């Protein structure tokens, strides 16, 4: 009888152990859905389509944390982009293409390993004004930024705690990650950033280097070079208006003529944007944006972007928006008004574009 009771006690302990651990952890399901209708005219042609993610990237995700004591937690996030217009994945078939990482957070900061946002990505989000979303439809930087610098797979990132308003970050990404069919360093990314905020003032400076190739066919022996990105952001909230400025410079790619995301290649260029967020306009918020892209050594690759959007919150979770965007391209530039997640309506090189949008955002 004693042996039987002992076995029952052991079984009860084993059965309840996972539930005891679960009581110290939390898991949250979250998401945002953004759907809109966009109309654009370019080169004498008009296009109207149902869009997704114009003001805010449509996504759903799971995130959680487990307290393991000493002020330290194990943390994770899995986030997937959604194309609400047709129900497909928004990241070229990747199930969790927006974020996928696990890490630890404590008094000395946090470390994340997996698919991470770069310091540059956080800089773009912090210094582009908006209410329903940031770095989204109507923003010049969203039209001009080189997207392979914003999310890095096979990466490790460290973010410091808040040090009297200053936050530091450092990242390393293993691009090819041992793929024998690619150059061993292709896509390798090194990045560091600093963000400072004090009341209504904020400033950021980020650096990122990335290995690319200009080879027409990627092989293990393809030659590689390194491009360098610098981002500077500043903002000040005057109360009646919040003003943001952003400047992004890329150098180290003199032989690159056009963007090529598969080879991490970005031409030498810089762009800047000045944006403003005006609250309490008919109970909503007005966003204004002006920015320019300058291609080094070829002014025909330049572009200018204007954006105006009105965001109105129906509730804490739901908002509607409407906007107009104008892009003026040089004869060799083909920039378009991008959404918050993915490309906009295509533009032929040399054509200008006028676009309008009306949409709704709901968070859950």
Image: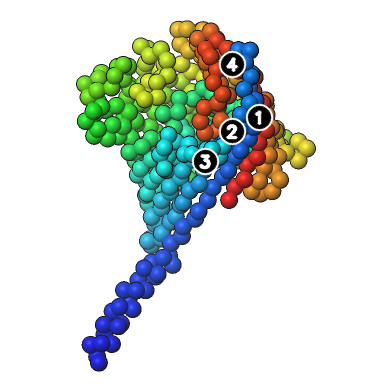
C-alpha distance separating marks 1 and 4: 19 Å
Where disc 1 sits, the SS reads strand
Q: Please state which of the two labelled residues, at mark 2 or mark 1, is closer to the viewer.
A: 2
Residue occupying image coordinates x 61% and y 38%: 35
Q: Residues within 10 Å of mark 2 (few under 14, many from 20)?
A: many
Q: Nearer the viewer, residue 302 or 84?
A: 84
C-alpha distance separating marks 2 and 1: 9 Å
Residue named by callout 3: 87
Where disc 4 sits, the SS reads strand
C-alpha distance separating marks 1 and 3: 20 Å
Q: Please state which of the two labelled residues, at mark 3 or mark 2, is closer to the viewer.
A: 3
Q: Please state which of the two labelled residues, at mark 2 or mark 4, is closer to the viewer.
A: 2
Question: Taking the image as drawn, is residue 239 in sight?
Answer: no
Where disc 3 sits, the SS reads loop
- Using the rendered view, name the quadrant where residue 313 is placed: top right
Assess whether mark 4 and mark 1 are in contact (beta carbons under 8 angstroms): no
Residue occupying image coordinates x 28% and y 87%: 5
Indicate the quadrant containing the N terminus: top left, top right, bottom left or bottom right.
bottom left
Q: Nearer the viewer, residue 47 or 205?
A: 47
Residue occupying image coordinates x 66% and y 46%: 318
Q: Residues within 10 Å of mark 4 (few under 14, many from 20)?
A: many
Q: Extreme right residue here?
A: 282
C-alpha distance separating marks 2 and 4: 23 Å
Question: Taking the image as drawn, is residue 179 in sight?
Answer: yes
Residue named by callout 1: 357
Disc sitting over residue 304 in the figure: 4
Q: Residues within 10 Å of mark 3 (few under 14, many from 20)?
A: few
Residue named by callout 2: 51
Assess whether mark 1 and mark 2 are in contact (beta carbons under 8 angstroms): yes
């Amino acid at each position: 009888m004693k042996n039987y009771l002992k076995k029952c006690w052991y079984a009860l302990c084993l059965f309840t152990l996972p539930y005891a651990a679960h009581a110290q952890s939390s898991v949250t399901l979250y998401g945002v859905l953004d759907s809109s209708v966009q109309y654009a005219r370019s080169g004498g042609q008009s296009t109207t389509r149902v869009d997704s993610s114009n003001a805010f990237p449509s996504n759903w995700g799971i995130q959680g944390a487990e307290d393991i004591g000493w002020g330290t937690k194990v943390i994770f996030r899995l986030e997937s982009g959604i194309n609400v217009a047709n129900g497909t994945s928004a990241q070229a078939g990747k199930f969790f293409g927006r974020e996928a990482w696990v890490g630890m957070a404590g008094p000395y900061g946090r470390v994340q390993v997996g698919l991470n946002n770069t310091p540059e990505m956080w800089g773009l989000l912090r210094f582009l004004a908006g209410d329903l979303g940031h770095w989204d439809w109507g923003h010049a930087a969203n039209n001009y930024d080189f997207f392979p610098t914003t999310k890095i797979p096979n990466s490790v990132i460290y973010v410091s705690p808040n040090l009297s308003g200053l936050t530091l970050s450092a990242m390393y990404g293993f691009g090819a990650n041992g793929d024998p069919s690619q150059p061993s360093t292709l896509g390798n990314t090194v990045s560091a950033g600093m963000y400072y905020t004090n009341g209504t003032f904020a400033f950021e400076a980020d650096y990122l280097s990335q290995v690319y190739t200009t080879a027409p066919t990627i092989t293990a022996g393809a030659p590689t070079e390194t491009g360098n990105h610098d981002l500077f952001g500043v903002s000040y909230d005057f109360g009646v208006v919040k003003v943001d400025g952003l400047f992004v410079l890329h150098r180290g790619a003199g032989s690159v003529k056009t963007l090529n995301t598969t080879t991490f290649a970005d031409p030498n260029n810089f762009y800047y944007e000045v944006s403003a967020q005006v609250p309490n306009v008919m109970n909503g918020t007005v966003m204004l944006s002006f920015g320019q892209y300058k291609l080094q050594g070829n002014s025909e690759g330049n572009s200018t972007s204007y954006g105006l959007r009105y965001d109105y919150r129906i509730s804490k979770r739901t908002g509607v928006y409407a906007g107009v965007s104008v892009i003026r391209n040089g004869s060799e530039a083909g920039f378009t008004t991008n959404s918050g997640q993915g490309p906009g309506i295509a533009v032929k090189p040399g054509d200008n574009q006028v676009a309008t949008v009306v949409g709704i955002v709901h968070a859950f």
